[in-house]
Image (tube, helix red, strand yellow):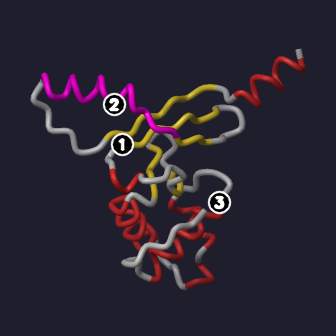
Amino acid sequence: MAHAHPDLTKNQALVFGRLSDASGPLTAYAILDELRDNGFRAPLQVYRALDKLVDYGLVHRLESLNAFVACRHKGCSDHKTAAFAICDLCGNVLEFAPDQAMEHLLSWTESQEFQLSRTTIELRGTCSYCSASDKAAS
């Protein structure tokens, strides 16, 4: 699902490619370990690439996991909101568009004259697959 971005440096493209191929979120150190054969030697190389990829809207940082995922939501670079449902059991991460929630949040920020720059919503819980598996095991 990797989408090319014309302004990516070699390091940014490598980091984005690794995240795009990953089955789940990766920490910066996991990315570093996986890209050592490509010339990565220091965490700073990975963090610089990740910072730009986040700025471009191609990658999201999951604050609660201190990890990163490639964007799976078409058009993410056009807005400053990301929302994720994270399964506490299997670690699956689903990205979704939180349109109704954002309407309420934007209304609140306007009423408070708060200048919103970015929003990341993380829902933690149990995915439908793990819930069904848990019920079946009972």
Image: 4 above or below 81 = below
Kind of residue at badge 3: Ala
- Are the two marked residues, 2 and 1, in contact with CB atoms closer than 8 angstroms? yes
Q: Which mark is residue 126?
A: none
- Left/right placement of residue 112 relative to residue 38 reads left
Q: Residues within 10 Å of mark 3 (few under 14, many from 20)?
A: few
Name the residue at 36% across, 63% down.
56
- Are the two marked residues, 3 and 2, in contact with CB atoms closer than 8 angstroms? no
Q: Earlier in the sequence, mark 2 or mark 1?
A: 1
Picture quadrant where residue 44 is located = bottom left
Q: Is 102 within the magenta?
A: yes
The residue indicated by pointer 3 is: 22
3D distance between C-alphas at marks 3 and 1: 22 Å
Q: Which mark is residue 81?
A: 1
- Residue at the farthest right position: 137
Give how far across and how far down residue 11 sits, in percent.
Answer: 46, 78
Kind of residue at badge 1: Thr
